[in-house]
Amino acid sequence: MIFALDVGGDAGEALKWVDLLKDHVGMFKIGKEAFTSFGPQLVREVVTRGGDVFLDLKFHDIPNTVARAAEGALRLNVSMFNIHALGGARMMEDTVKAVEVLSRQLGRPMPMILAVTVLTSLDDGDVERLGFHVSASELAVHLARLARDAGMTGVVASAREVGPIRDACGDDFVIVTPGIRLAAPAEGDDQKRVLTPREALRMGADYIVVGRPIRMADDPVAAARMISEEIAEGIALKTPS
């Protein structure tokens, strides 16, 4: 379970969530909201506190720029970061190569490098308006194959695409699933293609990203424990590959 750390009016409040949840979640996601507000120091503080970091900045630029940004992520000692698959095969290949070289030079293990496929806020209608003449699921699977061939560790994708991506890319390909809800999304929720933790793990997701169900709970620790139980149930019911 990855907890989305885009919370708090200051870094101190964000770090209180780390101290509260570090024994109950597997990783902390630092996205654009938190990183823009609090900067690289937040990443360093989470790592110092013993938390693993998923740096969710979705790098998307020319290959050289993304490769240099990826090297910066490695120097921050993150466990996972992502780039946009729509940046193309060369961008992904150059990023993987750059991180491999710097990892050897620094004597550090390679972080997981994920490709963002189709945002969970987009549905088939949104994808069509963007000019793609395929469904959101078909586009996600196509981009996942492109990422696999470029040497990426895995992808970020809706749980609804986990099965087809697993079939296309194999069991060793990592799938991280955002858009996790404990029930149907409420009115005004900007996530469209969502599933519960149990459903996501049953379908074969490796990691799930959870934010609001824990942040908005009266007892966040109890909510994290409940989600952990759902994860265990989902793994027990996991669809065979």
Image (cartoon, helix red, strand yellow):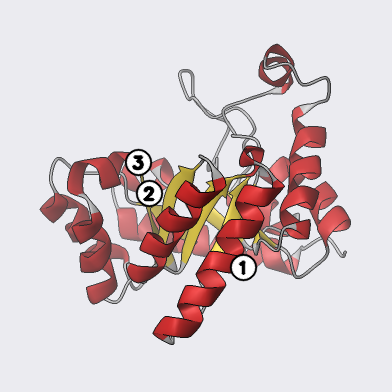
Number of residue marks: 3
- From the image, tell me which residue sits under label 1: 232
Q: Residue at x 32, y 67 (%)?
A: 76
The outermost residue toward the top is: 129
**On the picture, is 147 further left or further right than 29?**
right
In the image, 63 versus 237, the foreground residue is 63
Amino acid type for the residue under numbered disc 1? Ala
The relative height of residue 51 versus residue 8 in the rendered view (above or below) is below
Whole-percent x, y for residue 222 in the image: 36, 59
Query: How far apart are labels 1 and 2 at the CA level?
Result: 17 Å
The relative height of residue 155 versus residue 124 in the rendered view (above or below) is below
Amino acid type for the residue under numbered disc 3? Lys
- From the image, tell me which residue sits under label 2: 214
The relative height of residue 22 versus residue 109 in the rendered view (above or below) is above
Residue 238, picture quadrant:
bottom right
First-in-chain label (1 vs 2): 2
Whole-percent x, y for residue 22 in the image: 32, 69
- From the image, tell me which residue sits under label 3: 32
Whole-percent x, y for residue 176 in the image: 60, 55
Category of crowding for the residue at label 2, using alpha-carbon neighbours closer than 10 angstroms: few (below 14), some (14–19), many (at least 20): many
Q: Is residue 58 visible?
A: yes
**On the picture, is 187 further left or further right than 89?**
left
Q: Of helix, strand and loop, which one carries label 2?
A: helix
